Image (cartoon, rainbow, N blue to C red):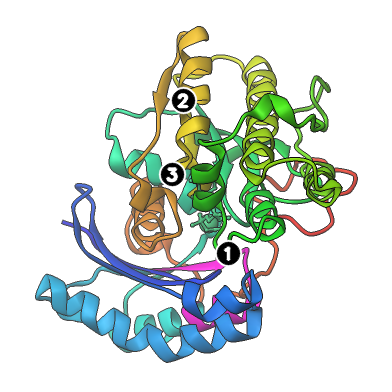
Amino acid sequence: MMLVLGIESSCDETAAALVCADRTILAQRIASQDEAHRPYGGVVPEIAARAHADRIAPLIAATLGDAGLTLDAVDAIAATAGPGLIGGVMVGLVTAKALAMATDRPLLAINHLEGHALSPRLADPDLAFPYLLLLASGGHCQLLLVEGVGRYRRLGTTIDDALGEAFDKTAKVLGLGYPGGPAVERLARQGDAGRVPLPRPLLGTAEPHFSFAGLKSAVLRAREAGIHADADIAAAFQQAAIDCVIDRTRRALALAGPVGALVVAGGVAANQALRGALEALAAAAQLRFVAPPLALCTDNAAMIAWAGLERIAVQGGPGAGDPLDVAARPRWPLDPAAAPVRGAGVKA
Ligand code: KG4
Ligand code: ZN
């Protein structure tokens, strides 16, 4: 049975995984760089690239060791080729190229977003196309109609900050440390969202795009006013963000046409309040709600290996490979036909 080695290094996680075509994850390792970036309150690209370079080879060796295998057992090597922080992407992709060349196996240059888009099918064999995916992480906030392997329609995206980024910046304003999402969620449980009026940017607009920069600024002003408890600010921020996400997702569902499921992926999918709200939205629309296990929602290499396996299944074995000179791409939209969005300066 087909076995793929996946490699992920596009942000601050160095990861390797061995995944079989029958969805078995034989082994996976993730080295997080949270400690290295914590003093800066966010990911520093140069530090990330160096950390990936230090860790990636031993990490792959250890992953093979965990499975009791050598590279000989691997049928193809899949690596994230973008979008992401280019230094880190290059480390992973060049490593994959070297392994592909040394073993004479096909190289699969995977779009990181495609990894996220297809990972719910790794966890759930019953999840059929098409489905609507909310991808919400520290780097991305998109609504994607996943129609098939290689067939994605981007219905909405953020015009400024990603949702996880908004959580992280709110955490910074409240002095909660990095990564901030879980800390904001914990504090929000003790607060009253109704005590702090905050805006809901783009609510009710026709296209299901997101904007969180204004919300983040409002959080800063609310804190500086010095009259609100931090817990109330955290609760109000989280509620405003969730209201926006639900409104935008409802709009995307209306535009998507018939879908079988509403799926959430990305690190922010860990947020229980968000999950609950999405679940209710799906139930109201009589749709299945699918939230993969968190380990597959956050950045990982199993999803990259799986995207490689999905491609092989569609395009056929060795023919699915990419040339060894394939480029690392800092930006790589999943849906090249999607119209550029005003204000979308930095997000793929
Ligand atoms: O997918 P991920 O691990 O990495 C990428 O950004 O690609 O997502 C991390 C993001 C961070 O911004 C983090 O603050 C956020 O997900 N996050 C959360 C929660 N757990 C993680 N945001 C809100 N609530 C949470 N419980
Ligand atoms: Zn990601």
14 vs 215, left or right, is left
Residue bearing the label numbered 1: 177
Name which residue lies at 69% across and 22% down: 247
| Residue 87 forms part of the magenta stretch | yes
Q: Which quarter of the image is occupied by the C terminus?
A: bottom right
The magenta-colored residue range is: 78-92
Label 1 element class: loop
Q: Which-is-in-front pick, marks 2 and 1? A: 1
Whole-number angstrom distance, CA of label 3 to CA of label 2: 22 Å
Report crowding for label 2: few under 14, some 14 to 19, many 20 or more residues within 10 A (C-alpha): few
Q: Is residue 241 above or below residue 4?
A: above
Q: Position of residue 275 (x, y in %)?
A: 47, 31
Name which residue lies at 62% across and 19% down: 253
Name which residue lies at 64% across and 72% down: 85
Quarter-wise, where is residue 238 in the image? top right
Residue bearing the label numbered 2: 276
State which tag comes first along the sequence, 1 or 3.
Answer: 3
Whole-number angstrom distance, CA of label 1 to CA of label 3: 31 Å
Residue bearing the label numbered 3: 118
Q: Nearer the viewer, residue 138 or 61?
A: 138
User: Given the image, on which type of amino acid does mark 3 rest?
Assistant: Leu
